[in-house]
Image (spheres, helix red, strand yellow):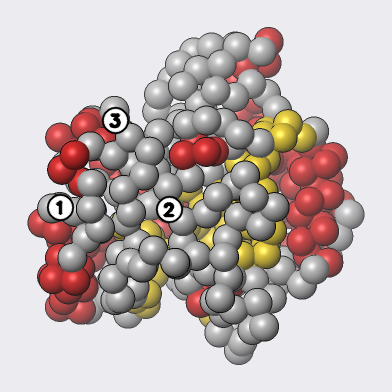
Amino acid sequence: MEKEFYLPRKIEAIDRALDRLSSLETSCQLCPRRCRVNRARGQTGLCQTTSQARVSAALLHFGEEPVLSGSNRPAGNRGSGTIFFAGCNLKCLFCQNFQLSWLNEGKLVPEEELAAMMLNLQRQGALNINLVSPTHVILPILGALRIAYQQGLSIPLIYNSNGYEAIEVVEELRGIIDLYLPDLKYISAKLSAKYSAAPDYFEQARLVLQEMYCQQPDLLIDDRQIARQGLIIRHLVLPGSAQDSIKILEWIANNLSPSVGLSLMSQYHPCYQAPAEIQREITRSEYQIVMNRALELGFDNLFFQPEPFQEDEHLIPDFRRQNPFRWK
C-alpha cells in the first residue's frame, strides 16, 4: 500500500480506537484484570500505572528473532526499535524484566516525548518500532502514534505483549498494528494461577490470539528477510512443564495454523520470586522434546533457541544500566 494512503488510514484507525477505548480508563477495563480504578484521576490498579506511560528504555535491540532485529550483533542489521514500558498487568513471579514489571522503574513521558522516541529510533535506522508490554498503556501509546505518524513515522509497528489482553481492546487495533508478537505462556490454569495469579490466562489469551490471527494471518517477509507484518507467537519453555508446552503447540496448530510464526524460547532463567520448583534453567532434553513436537506439527516459520542458557548471555537485561543488554 502506498504511503500516502497507508498513513492516513492508520491515523483514522487510531482516532477510532481512542474514541472507543478512552472510556475504559476511567473505570479501568483495559485488560482482563478489570481493576475498575479511575486511572485518569491518578488511581492505580495491579499494573501500577495511571494515564501516563512510564518508559524504562528505548533502544535498538539486536537480540530479537532474526526477522525482527536482523542480527544478534550491532555490526549486522540495524536492530529493532524497542521501547520498554514499566508496569505490567500480568506480573509473572519469574519475570526476567522484574525491574519494569514489578518494581515499575522508568521515566514518566508525555505523548509528545514518546512520539519523539519512536521517530528517533527510526532515524537511527530501526527496522521497526517494537512496543514491549503495551497492554496497560495502550491509550498513551495511541496518542503518541498519532503524533509520530503525522511527523513521518513509517516503519512497521510491533505489539509485543504477554498475551493477557482484553479482546475488545485488541479488536480496536485492527489497521494499526503491523505485526503481533504475543506470548502464549500457559494452557494449564493451575500453572497460570500459581506463577501469574491469572487462572483465566489461557481462556483470555486464546480469544486474543484468534483475533490477532484474523487481523494479521500471513507472516510477510521482505527481500532483506525482515518481517513487515503478521503474527509470531512466543512460548517460553518452563522447567518441568514440557507437556504444557506441547499442548500449547497443538492448540496453535489446530486452532490457528502451522503457518503462523512460532518462537520457542529456551532462555528461562530463575529471576525475582521464582518458586523453588523452577529455580533452575531448563534442560537440553526438555527443550528437545518440545522442539521435536513443533517439527512434527509442521510449523513453517519456526524460530529456535537450541543451545542451553549461558550466564554471560545478553538475554537477561539490567535496566538500571545505561546499556541494559550485553551485546556480543
* Residue 54 seen from this side: yes
- In this figure, which residue is indicated by the disc labeled 2? 182
Please identify the quadrant where the N terminus is shown.
bottom right
In-image side of 111 versus 208 (left or right) = right
The mark that comes first in sequence, 3 or 1, is 3
- Where residue 241 is drawn, which disc sits there? 1
Give the residue displayed 46% in from the left and 21% down from the top.
46
In-image side of 216 versus 60 (left or right) = left
Give the residue displayed 38% in from the left and 38% down from the top.
272
Mark 2: few/some/many CA within 10 Å (<14, 14-19, 20+): many
SS state under label 3: loop
What is the x, y in percent for residue 302?
34, 76
State if disc 1 and disc 2 touch (CB < 8 Å). no
Give the residue displayed 70% in from the left and 52% down from the top.
322
- In this figure, which residue is indicated by the disc labeled 3? 198
Give the residue displayed 39% in from the left and 63% down from the top.
311
Looking at the rendered structure, the kind of residue marked 1 is Ser
